C-alpha cells in the first residue's frame, strides 16, 4: 500500500474518495523516486485526522469529498498549524472552487487530467515552497481578476498599478511579486533580476509581510485580486 520511506523522501497523504482514481494516483506516487505515499484517506474528516497522525510533507486533496469537502478539510488542517503543503487535486475548475481552495490555504491546484510527470512535478514544487497552479487554473484565475496582461507594459499600465499599490511595495518588490505570480522560485527570481538568492528571499519575505499573507500562493492571489500585476 505504501513505499518504504527514507528521511529524504517527500511524504504524501492522498485524500480521494473515488477508489479507482485513488488506486491509480497511489500507483503513480509509489513508482516515483523521492516520493513516498504514507497514507490514504477516503473522506475529508479522515484526511484531517490522518494529517495530524502522519504529518505528511504534502497532502494531495480532492475537493468533492464526503463528510467534509476538501476545501473545509484544507481549512481545518491549516487552522491546526500542521506544517504540510496542500495540493488540491480535482476535476473542478470553476471560479468559486478555485478561489475558495486558495483562500482556505491551499498551496497549489492541479487538475486530475494532469500527466503523472506533471503531478509529481507539482508535488515536488509545493514541497519546496513554490506556488503551483495548473496552467488551466492559472488562466482561469487571471481572466477572473484582470484583463489580459500585455507583454509590453505601457506607462499608463505602470501608473495604474502604482495607484493600486496601497501596500507600500517598492518598485523592486512589485517586480518580484509579478514573478511570484508567474510561479518562479527564489533562485529563478534571483537569476531573472540579476540579484543574489538571499536578496530575492528578503524581497519575498517583505512582500508577504506587506500583503499580510502567510505564503506565496496567497500573495499571488492577493496581487491578482488587487490588480497589482
Image: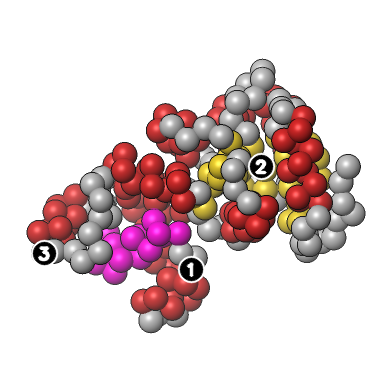
Label 3 to label 2: alpha-carbon separation: 42 Å
Circle 3 residue: 155
First along the sequence among labels 3 and 2? 2
Q: Which residues are magenta?
A: 168-183
Which image quadrant is residue 44 in?
top right
Query: Is residue 175 inside the magenta stretch?
Result: yes
Tell me which secondary structure the magenta stretch mostly adopts. helix
SS for dot 3: helix
Residue 30 visible in this rendered orientation of the protein: yes
Residue 173 visible in this rendered orientation of the protein: no
Of badges 1 and 2, nearer the viewer stands: 2
First along the sequence among labels 1 and 2? 2
First along the sequence among labels 3 and 1? 3
State whether residue 175 is above or below residue 111: below
Circle 2 residue: 60
At a point 25% along the width and 55% down the height, the residue shown is: 149
Q: Nearer the viewer, residue 215 or 23?
A: 23
Location of residue 22 in the rendering, given as x and y in whole percent from the top left corner: 75, 36
Mark on residue 111?
A: none
Amino acid at each position: 500500500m505504501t513505499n518504504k520511506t527514507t528521511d529524504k523522501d517527500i511524504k504524501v497523504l492522498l485524500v480521494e474518495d473515488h477508489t479507482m482514481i485513488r488506486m491509480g494516483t497511489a500507483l503513480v506516487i509509489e513508482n516515483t523516486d523521492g516520493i513516498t505515499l504514507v497514507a490514504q484517506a477516503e473522506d475529508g474528516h479522515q484526511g484531517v485526522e490522518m494529517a495530524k497522525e502522519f504529518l505528511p510533507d504534502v497532502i494531495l486533496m480532492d475537493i468533492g469529498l464526503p463528510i467534509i469537502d476538501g476545501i473545509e478539510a484544507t481549512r481545518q488542517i491549516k487552522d491546526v498549524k500542521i506544517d504540510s503543503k496542500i495540493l488540491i487535486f480535482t476535476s473542478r475548475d470553476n471560479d468559486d472552487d478555485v478561489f475558495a481552495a486558495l483562500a482556505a490555504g491551499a498551496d497549489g491546484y492541479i487538475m486530475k487530467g494532469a500527466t503523472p510527470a506533471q503531478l509529481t512535478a507539482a508535488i515536488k514544487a509545493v514541497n519546496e515552497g513554490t506556488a503551483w497552479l495548473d496552467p488551466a487554473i492559472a488562466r482561469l484565475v487571471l481572466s477572473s481578476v484582470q484583463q489580459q496582461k500585455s507583454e509590453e507594459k505601457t506607462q499608463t499600465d505602470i501608473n495604474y498599478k502604482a495607484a493600486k499599490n496601497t501596500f507600500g511595495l517598492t518598485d523592486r518588490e512589485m517586480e518580484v511579486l509579478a514573478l511570484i505570480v508567474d510561479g518562479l522560485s527564489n533562485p529563478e527570481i534571483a537569476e531573472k533580476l540579476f540579484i543574489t538568492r538571499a536578496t530575492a528571499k528578503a524581497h519575498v519575505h517583505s512582500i508577504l509581510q506587506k500583503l499580510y499573507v502567510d505564503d506565496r500562493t496567497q500573495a499571488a492571489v492577493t496581487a491578482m485580486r488587487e490588480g497589482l500585476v
